[in-house]
Image (cartoon, grey):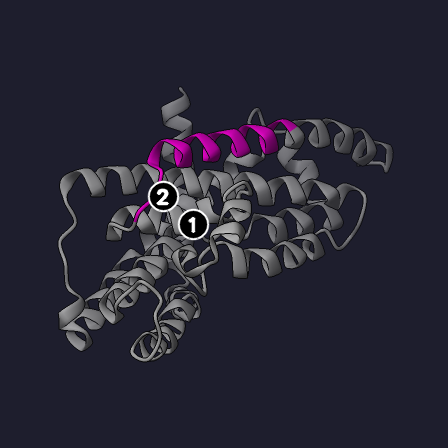
Amino acid sequence: MIWKKAKTLLVVYYAYMVEYRAELILWVLAGSLPIIVMGVWIQASQGGQFGLTPIDFARYFLAVFLVRQFTVVWVIWEFEREVVEGKLSSRLLQPLDPAWHHVTSHISERAARMPFTILLIALFFILYPQAFWIPSISQIFLFTIAVLLAFTLRFVIQYTFAMFAFWTERASALENFWFLFSLFLSGLIAPLEVFPESVRAVVLCTPFPYLIDFPVSILVGLPTDIGRGFAMIIGWTLLFLGLNRILWRAGLKRYSGMGA
């Protein structure tokens, strides 16, 4: 029964996403910031000492682009709109946690955007053939698990922030504030490998590096503590998941009290 519901949701949301192919292309291109930043770091590495070669930077930021395609999340804007417009009420009448609608929507969107992502990766290797490499089977396996966990963590964090829509009409402002830290600490615009050791030690205690830098490091072969990385992802996910459930129950009481 559960698999039947999951299949139905995935098919429905995939069909919905495919209707907006042009928008999907724009979203894929919007995630090309790592490729732009890559050019800056390649130039800088030719005249500086960063411990990484231009090829390393090229591979790193290509992997960042790939990870971003799998882990981008927008649930806070959807949930905020549902609460503000009262559309959440109809979802609550269904024998299914509303979160699963958002989860399947995100998964279906990944499948719909994949052809465009593959096309851009192929174009990258045409322009930078020297950066081509084939990761080992173990790297691909660990990378796949890391990306799945990174998406789960990213989704749970943003969905937790979305719960504040029960108390404010601008819960998305929390996501914007969070993104400022994520931009610099997740590995999106600079590998953690170039950070000072003391700074890197502090950053590794936060959830940010495990959203991008950790899976990327696995794929390109940069030094990383795999055991600690997976433990930190799971730990932060459980922490935010627990907070999410607390806010969800408190928020529903407030939502019902408002006449929903």
Quadrant location, the C terminus: top right
176 w.r.t. 95: above or below: below
Query: In screen coordinates, is 83 left or right of 198?
Result: right
The picture places residue 182, in percent across and down from the top left corner, at: 55, 55
Amino acid at pointer 2: Val
Answer yes or no: is residue 102 visible: no
Q: Earlier in the sequence, mark 1 or mark 2?
A: 1
Q: Viewer-proximal residue, 236 or 167? A: 236
> Cβ–Cβ below 8 Å for labels 1 and 2?
yes
Q: Residues within 10 Å of mark 2 (few under 14, many from 20)?
A: many
Q: Residue at x 37, y 39 (%)?
A: 148
At 39% from the left edge and 67% from the top edge, which residue is drawn?
Answer: 34
- Residue 209 is situated, as x and y percent measured from the top left of the image, at 47, 48
Identity of the residue drawn at 41% across and 63% down: 20
Note whether 174 is above or below 250 in the view shown: below
Q: Residue at x 50, y 44 (%)?
A: 204
Residue 71 shows which numbered tag?
Answer: 1
Q: CA distance from mark 1 to mark 2?
A: 7 Å
The image shows residue 177, relative to residue 89, as above or below, that is below
Residues 257 and 219: in front is: 219
Q: How many marks?
A: 2
How packed mark 1 is, by other alpha carbons closer than 10 Å (few <14, some 14-19, many 20 or more), is many
Asked whether 44 or 131 is in front, the reply is: 44
For the N terminus, give its image quadrant: top left
Q: Main secondary structure of the magenta part?
A: helix
Please report the bounds of the magenta region as a residue range: 223-242
**Which residue is denoted by mark 2 in the rendering?**
147
Secondary structure at numbered mark 1: helix
Amino acid type for the residue under numbered disc 1: Thr
Residue 62, located in which quarter of the rendered image? bottom left
In the figure, is residue 69 to the left or right of 86? left
Write down the quadrant of residue 180 in the picture: bottom right
